[in-house]
Amino acid sequence: MTADGEHGELDFWSFVELANRRLATEYGFRHQLATELLLTLNRASNIVTYDLEASVHRPRGRSWSGFRLLFVTWLAGPLEAKKAAELTGMSRAAVSNLAKTLVADGLLARTPGEHDGRSVLLSLTERGTEEMVELFREQNEREYEWASVLTEAEQRILVMLLDKLVSNRDQFDVRGRN
Amino acid sequence: MTADGEHGELDFWSFVELANRRLATEYGFRHQLATELLLTLNRASNIVTYDLEASVHRPRGRSWSGFRLLFVTWLAGPLEAKKAAELTGMSRAAVSNLAKTLVADGLLARTPGEHDGRSVLLSLTERGTEEMVELFREQNEREYEWASVLTEAEQRILVMLLDKLVSNRDQFDVRGRN
DNA sequence: GCGAGGTAGTAAATGCGTGAACTATATGGG
DNA sequence: CCCATATAGTTCACGCATTTACTACCTCGC
């Protein structure tokens, strides 16, 4: 506590500390570590994502989601819109909308599915591929800058823990997108 | 590779594997682990956040951001809109918009700042506090379910690594929100 | 004190993602 | 074969967050 009668200079970590204390002592909540974990997870993801979008994608006229769709389409070859939605974690509607603009931009091609008259296959155009290579080069450099704060071992542990956090989720009923 | 000539059943992890392989062998990119890390981070955050929003906040008519603003205001007491934006990681405009609707809903109070005629202090109304206690009780249970997939030690390591990932970021120029 | 420059907050315009409703196609039991 | 049901994709209305521009206020140096 500091001179101004409030909490002094409150940054993220002192807030977490304050929250833990008040939640435990004033309200009797017991799962502070869980709160802290999810708060930190959310924050880290937002910070990194925002930086990547602002520093590499926006300047080139792409959105984060646009990039993600192009990325999976680039590497997982022609795929159904449904599959693209699953891999990117977006809704089918989002893929549909994004695809529309990316097709208009000449980066994406939309062809009817072979075995299913309802489905649509997404693939990159030649220009799309070229642009992705370029775009990813930049993104990858920046990703590397971010990741390099951690040692390689730490990075692997982090990936492992994040994976464990979400992959055991069939143990309870998790809400996902359509 | 499987019978259908494509990649068979492609889930997130087989996609990551495929991506790593193609990025390395076909395109010569070198920082696969960084890509994998940020992909996983983003995905984990989205899955958990979506679940919390869908299972506890939406049913009660609150948004994820609304909850976050109420949460910091609840625990960090009356605070300036600016500070709330920093702690929640939103833009000042977002806080301003959210506050407007939360004030209308009778959960939040807006009072002029004491020492600075420009600033606005946000605080919870009595009803806001009651609702937060209730809301957080639910959220905390669910957070606990998520976190419990990991041991306590794993949770602490995860928090530590996530923190390390973002707190050394002054080493390069990171783009943040206004 | 006064004017330049900076900061807090809000407003307006824009863009994007979601759920819900809808179309078209597929599938399977009677 | 046909109808009920399910699924892929799109469209629409809405909510929400962002950027940009603006107002009001503060502060510092001359």
Image: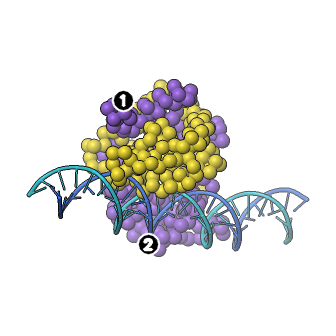
Chain colours: A yellow, B purple, C cyan, D blue
Q: Nearer the viewer, residue B36 or A43?
A: B36
Depth check, front residue: C25 or A34: C25
Label 2: which secondary element: loop
* Residue A120 shows up from this direction: yes
- Mark 1 Cα-neighbour bin, 10 Å: few <14, some 14–19, many ≥20: few
Report the mark closest to the observer, 1 or 2.
Answer: 1
Residue on which the image places disc 2: B105
Q: Say which quadrant the C terminus of chain B sits in.
A: bottom right
Q: Amino acid at mark 2?
A: Asp
Disc 1 secondary structure class: loop
Q: Is residue B145 left or right of residue B72?
A: left
Q: CA distance from mark 1 to mark 2?
A: 55 Å
Q: Which mark is residue B1?
A: 1
| CB within 8 Å, label 1 to label 2 | no
In the image, residue B106 lies at what x, y percent?
44, 73
- Circle 2 chain: B
| In the rendered image, residues at marks 1 and 2 fall on the same chain | yes
Residue depicted at x 45% and y 38%: A77
Residue B20 % position (x, y)? 47, 30
The crowd level at tag 2 (other Cα within 10 Å; few <14, some 14-19, many 20+) is few
Q: How many marks?
A: 2
Mark number displayed over residue A153: none
Q: Quadrant of residue A164?
A: top left
Rendered residue at 57%/33% (across/down): A144
Q: What is the x, y in percent for residue A111?
A: 45, 48
Amino acid type for the residue under numbered disc 1: Met
Q: Nearer the viewer, residue A97 or A29?
A: A97
